[in-house]
Image (cartoon, rainbow, N blue to C red):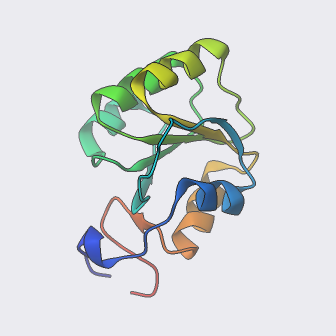
Amino acid sequence: MGLHDPEQVNKMKIDEVANILKATVHHIPENYDVDIVQAGAADLMSDVLAYVQRDMLLITGLNTIQVIRTASVMDITAIVFTRGKVPTHQMIEEAKSSNITILSTDYKTYTTCGLLYSSGVMSIDGESPGE
């Protein structure tokens, strides 16, 4: 498995991500036109601080305001909450003020990652399907 330049891999719009994951959309910022290229999963925000890439999609089962705050600090533009976790009103408001897209899905974290990876979204390790 090799590493790729994100400019040379599959790019996906957030509505495609929502469709693949059968996700509920809680918030999409106005004029949101970010291409999802990379995704990573973590429930420990210390891992997010250590390993994330700018503009990536964060997949997590942790349902706290701290997820939104960490995403804001790390320039993460979209979050998917897994395992049927629904963000609170306070989390959605914080996401709105930080221009972060918020989705939730009933899929488990592992399944969520697998669905996106098999659809061509690269991991934060720089790996993509078919290598």
Who's the residue at 66% across and 54% down the image? Answer: 18
Who is closer to the viewer here, 94 or 3? Answer: 94
**Image quadrant for the N terminus?**
bottom left
User: Furthest residue to the top?
Assistant: 90
Residue at the (43%, 56%) spot, across then down: 39
Residue 28 picture quarter: top right
Quadrant location, the C terminus: bottom left
Residue 19 position, x and y percent, is 70, 59
**Front-most of residues 62 and 71:** 71
Quarter where residue 97 is shown: top left
Q: Residue at (46%, 33%) from the top-left corner?
A: 100
Farthest front residue in view = 31
Q: Quadrant of residue 10?
A: bottom left
**Rendered location of residue 49, percent (x, y):** 28, 34
Residue displayed at 59% across by 22% down: 92
State the image coordinates of residue 127 (x, y, percent, origin top left).
Answer: 35, 72
- Check the image and report above or below for 73 versus 116: above
Left or right position of 44 against 15 = left
Q: Is residue 128 above or below residue 46?
A: below
Classify residue 56 as left or right of residue 115. Answer: left
